[in-house]
Structures are given as structure tokens and as C-alpha cells.
Image (cartoon, helix red, strand yellow):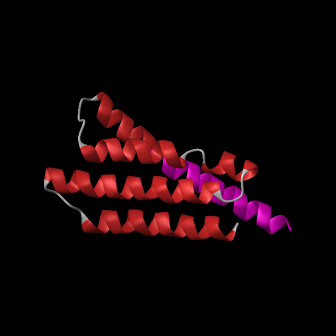
């Protein structure tokens, strides 16, 4: 039983970190005046994904949907940023999507 709590704590840490990094990155870009669609999507995705863990304690199904929506918006926004600026780094996006998928699978198992 103790392993479940440890895994949940580690998963929670990484989900909140993923959401906060994207929220801060999108927010910083928007504050600099770079109001592209990609930055708006990254900021909105981080904002939507951030309450996933607190919602998990209250509602059973909604946090999974908010995480899926938020992580998807973050990944799509980052891809759009690269496409708009003309420097798409495929390995960076592959790593980001892999991390999002692994966190999604972990959240589905909890």
C-alpha cells in the first residue's frame, strides 16, 4: 500500500511541474509581447492542466479530461511556435509528447 502513495506523489510532482513549466513559459512569452497563437495555447494548456491533482482528490473523472486537454494544448502550442518561427526541433517535440503520454498513462492508472 505504501508504494501506491509514493508513485502517486512522484506522478503528482511531475504533472504539476509539467503544467507549471508550460504556464510560466507561455506567460513569460505573452508578457514580452510575443502574442502568437502558440504562446496563447501553451499558457492556456498550462492553466488548464495545473488543477489536475487537486481535482483528483475531489472528482474522479474530470481531472483526467482536464489533463488531456491541457497537455494537448501545450504540445500543439509548442509545435505551432516552432512552425511559426521556422525552427521546428522534432526531437524536442517528440520528447515533450512522450513525457505527456507517460504522465497520461500514469494518471490513468491512479
Work out which quarter of the rendered image holds the N terminus and state it: bottom right
**What residue is drawn where x is 64% and y is 60%?**
11
> Among all residues in the image, which is located at the extreme right?
1
Looking at the image, residue 104 sits to the left or right of residue 45; the answer is: right
Q: Position of residue 3 (x, y in %)?
A: 79, 68
Work out which quarter of the rendered image holds the C terminus and state it: bottom right
The answer to if 107 sits in the magenta stretch is: no
Q: Position of residue 68 (x, y in %)?
A: 51, 60
**What residue is drawn where x is 22% and y is 55%?**
82
**What residue is drawn where x is 55% and y is 64%?**
103
Q: Quadrant of residue 60?
A: bottom right
Looking at the image, residue 108 sits to the left or right of residue 94; the answer is: right
Q: Quadrant of residue 51?
A: top right
The answer to if 2 sits in the magenta stretch is: yes
Q: Position of residue 30 (x, y in %)?
A: 31, 33
> Magenta part mainly helix, strand or loop?
helix
Q: How many marks?
A: 0
Looking at the image, residue 37 sits to the left or right of residue 13; the answer is: left
Residue 33 visible in this rendered orientation of the protein: yes
What span is in magenta? 1-22
Task: Say above or below: 42 vs 62.
Answer: above
> Among all residues in the image, which is located at the extreme left?
86
**What residue is drawn where x is 41% and y is 66%?**
97
Looking at the image, residue 89 sits to the left or right of residue 95; the answer is: left
Task: Say above or below: 99 vs 84.
Answer: below
Residue 20 visible in this rendered orientation of the protein: no
Q: Nearer the viewer, residue 51 or 19?
A: 51
Q: Position of residue 62 (x, y in %)?
A: 63, 55
Amino acid at each position: 500500500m505504501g508504494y501506491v502513495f509514493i508513485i502517486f506523489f512522484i506522478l503528482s510532482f511531475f504533472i504539476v511541474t509539467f503544467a507549471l513549466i508550460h504556464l510560466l513559459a507561455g506567460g513569460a512569452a505573452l508578457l514580452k509581447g510575443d502574442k502568437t497563437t502558440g504562446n496563447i495555447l501553451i499558457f492556456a494548456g498550462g492553466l488548464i492542466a495545473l488543477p489536475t491533482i487537486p481535482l483528483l482528490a475531489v472528482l474522479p473523472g474530470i481531472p483526467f479530461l482536464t489533463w488531456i486537454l491541457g497537455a494537448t494544448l501545450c504540445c500543439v502550442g509548442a509545435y505551432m511556435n516552432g512552425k511559426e518561427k521556422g525552427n521546428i526541433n522534432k526531437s524536442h517535440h517528440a520528447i515533450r509528447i512522450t513525457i505527456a503520454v507517460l504522465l497520461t498513462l500514469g494518471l490513468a492508472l491512479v
